[in-house]
Image: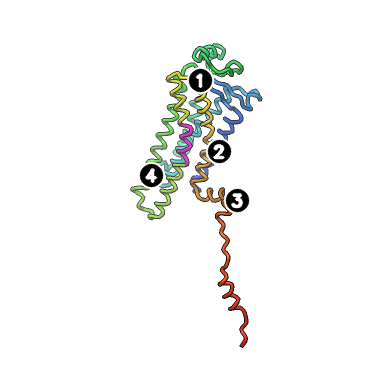
Amino acid sequence: MITIKWCMLYLHSLATFSSLWLTGAMMPYVYFPACAGFTVGLLPYLNVSTEIQGYIGIGCLGMLALSLPILFENRQRYLVDNYKITRPISRILFYSLNVLFVPISLFWVFSIIPEQISARQQVFQLLPCPTETYFHHSVFVLSLDHTPIITYLSALSTVSVVQILFFGGHSLTYLKTDAKKISITTRRLQKRFFIVISIQLVLPCVILFIPVVYFIYSMLSENYNQALNNISFVTMTLYGSIATLTMIFLHNPYKTFVLSMCPSFQKSSVEVVKPRKWVRRNAVSITTPVSF
């Protein structure tokens, strides 16, 4: 557990910051299939540009997705004997590529931002009946061409999924077939821990993956549904809560500690054992002096 704690800390730090940024600082309101929207959080009142808000918000979600291969690589490195990253310089390069992939690729996406006044007019033609809020806020248009956005989302998903399948599949295969140098008990514990970590990581990722699929579908089909746009972004902000709940209920020490704070659980778990009457009588009869 010690070897993976820093990777888990990195993941949960990103999840916490992303949730606070999206739900408090930024609070985006988007108009897919148009790559446009505005923010109503704290940062607009501090005169922070929507471009900077979007770059950090989208970047945090992308780095969150690419933090998962780092954890699976960590488990694979400590489990298997071959096809793993062994040299420290190679590991630093692997971590750096996963961390820097999102900011570098996003820089390319944000470098082709169109002129905003004419872009808003074209978005209005694409969405003939937007919500009333479109006319009361300064809408930021990220791109009029869907190709860069779809390319970024597709590349991010592919890079993350391919790495997870390789490191995760290799580790699981090793635990099932090749882990002969360790005892059966140790192998069983390692296998259980790996499965628990996999569920803890993959289940919250579904929360991110489903909205991304909808966004790509909306851009390709040019289907505008503001209700689904809002639901998709609300779903993405649930990542932190789902990740925390899965961590608590999949690991017994965390679950026991949290449940011990509930009064009803304390009453049901603590049993008061009272001595029976015959035990007390026997104890008295033994300790009481007997006179003849």
Residue at label 3?
Answer: 263
Q: Mark 1 points at which residue?
A: 35
Disc tally is 4
Distance between the alpha carbons at the discs numbered 3 and 1: 49 Å
Q: Which residue lies furthest to the bottom in this view?
A: 292
Side of 50 relative to 196 (left or right): right
- Secondary element at image label 3: helix
The image's mark for residue 172 is: 4
| Residue type pointed to by label 4 | Leu
Decide which of tag 2 and tag 1 comes sooner along the chain.
2
The residue at the point 41 percent across, 53 percent down is: 186
Viewer-side label of 3, 1 = 3
Whole-number angstrom distance, CA of label 4 to CA of label 3: 40 Å
Under mark 1, the amino acid is Cys
Q: Position of residue 195 (x, y in %)?
A: 42, 45
Residue 140 position by quadrant: top right
**Earlier-in-chain disc, 2 versus 4:** 2
Give me the C-alpha separation between circle 2 and circle 4: 27 Å
Q: Rate crowding at label 1 as few (under 14), some (14 to 19) or many (20 or more) other CA atoms within 10 Å.
A: some
Mark 4 burial class by Cα count in 10 Å: few <14, some 14-19, many 20+: some
Q: Where is residue 133 in the image (x, y as percent from the top left)?
A: 59, 19
Mark 4 to mark 1: distance in Å? Answer: 40 Å
For the point 49% across and 31% down, the residue is 62
Q: Is the magenta stretch mostly helix, strand or loop?
A: helix
> Which is nearer the N-term, disc 4 or disc 1?
1
Q: What residue type is labelled 3?
A: Pro
